[in-house]
Image (cartoon, rainbow, N blue to C red):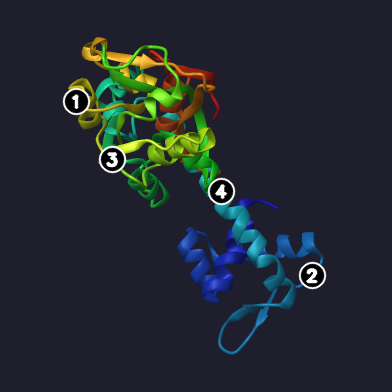
Amino acid sequence: MEMREMRSLVLLAEHGSIQEVGRRCHLSPGAVHQHLKILETEFGSRLYERGRGSLCLTTAGEMILPILKDILAGHEAAVAAMREWKEAERGLVRVGAGPTFTTHLLPRAIKKFRRRFSGVDVFVETGHSIMLRKQLQAGALDVIVAPAAEALEDPSLAQVARWKAPVVFVAARGSVPARCRLSVLQEKPFIMFQEGPRMNTIIQHYLDELGFRPKVVMRSDSSAAIKAMVRSGLGVTVLFLWNLNTEARSKGFTVVTTEAKPLITHMALIKKKSAYTPRAVSEFINVIGPMSWANLQAVGGALA
C-alpha cells in the first residue's frame, strides 16, 4: 500500500468519480481503478460501491478513511518539513521579549545568530510578558523570553531554554547599608512594578513568604523608570539582578542583602508545543539557549 493508492481512495470519497480522481492525480481511470483494487486486496474488503449517480465508500471504506487522511497529512507535513530544512539560510524568526532584555541582551543573541544564518530575518516584538504570551498563543510570535512560570501555568507552552536569575533588593548607593535586616528595609519607601505583570507576581509571592509588607509609594511597568527613581534616592525596589547589571550606571546602586534566603528564579525561552518547529526557529533556539549574560546563567543549555 503506497501513498498514491491511499490518495486515490480519499479523493474518491470526496468526488465520487474515478474519472475525476484521475484528472486530479494526472492518471488514467484504469490506473486509479488499479489503485483501488490494490487497497481492497490488502484490506480484504470492498471499499467502495456504486450509489445514486456516483461512487461512494462502503462501511469498511468509511471506517478507514480518517486513518488514511491522517497518514496522508502526516506525509505531506514531513515532505514540507524536509523541504524547509534543506533550504538553508532562509526563513523568519519572530521573537518577543521585555524592553530591558530587548535593549541590552537580545542584540548579542541576534548578532550571533545572523553570523551563522545571514539570510534569516529576525522580527522582534517588545512588550510585557502577558501581552507576549497572548501573541505566542495566537501564532503571531515563534518564541518569547519571559519568566519561566509563564510556560509552567499553560499546558500549550513549553520551555526550550532556561536561565537562572537572582532577584535582589536594590537601593541608591549610600542610602541603605549593603547588609541590613528586613526590619530596616520595612521602614523604607518602595518603588515596585505594577500589579498584574509576572515580575510583580513573582516578587509579591516572595515578599509574602517573608511576611514583608513594603511601603509602596510608586508603581510602574517600566524597569527603567523604577531604576531612575531608585537612583535618585526616592525609594528601594526589588529587581532581577541581570536587569540591574545591563547598564554602566549600575554602579550608582547598592544590592542589599538581608537575613532572608535570596530569591532565585528563572527566565525562559518559550514556544508553543507543536509536532514541528520551523528550521529557522529551531536554529535560533540552538544559538540562544546555551548563551549566558551577567547574572543570567544558562541552565543546561537549550531544552529543545
Q: Residue sitting at 68 percent across and 73 percent down?
A: 62
Residue at which label 4 appears:
155
**Dot placed on the residue nearer the N-terminal end, 1 or 2:** 2
Marks 3 and 2: CB-CB under 8 Å?
A: no
**Dot placed on the residue nearer the N-terminal end, 4 or 3:** 3
Count of numbered labels shown in the rendering:
4
Kind of residue at disc 4: Pro
Kind of residue at disc 2: Ser
Q: Nearer the viewer, residue 31 or 106?
A: 106
Percent of width and height locating residue 168: 41, 22
Residue at which label 3 appears:
127
Structural distance between the alpha carbons of marks 4 and 3: 22 Å
Structural distance between the alpha carbons of marks 4 and 2: 42 Å
**Dot placed on the residue nearer the N-terminal end, 4 or 2:** 2
Query: In the rendered image, which quarter is residue 269 located in?
Result: top left
Residue at which label 2 appears:
45
Q: Residue sitting at 22 percent across and 11 percent down?
A: 248
**Dot placed on the residue nearer the N-terminal end, 3 or 1:** 3
Structural distance between the alpha carbons of marks 3 and 2: 59 Å
Disc number for residue 228: 1
Q: Is residue 273 above or below residue 228?
A: below
Would you say 303 lies left or right of 111 here? right
Are there few (<14), some (14-19), or many (20+) residues within 10 Å of tag 2?
A: some
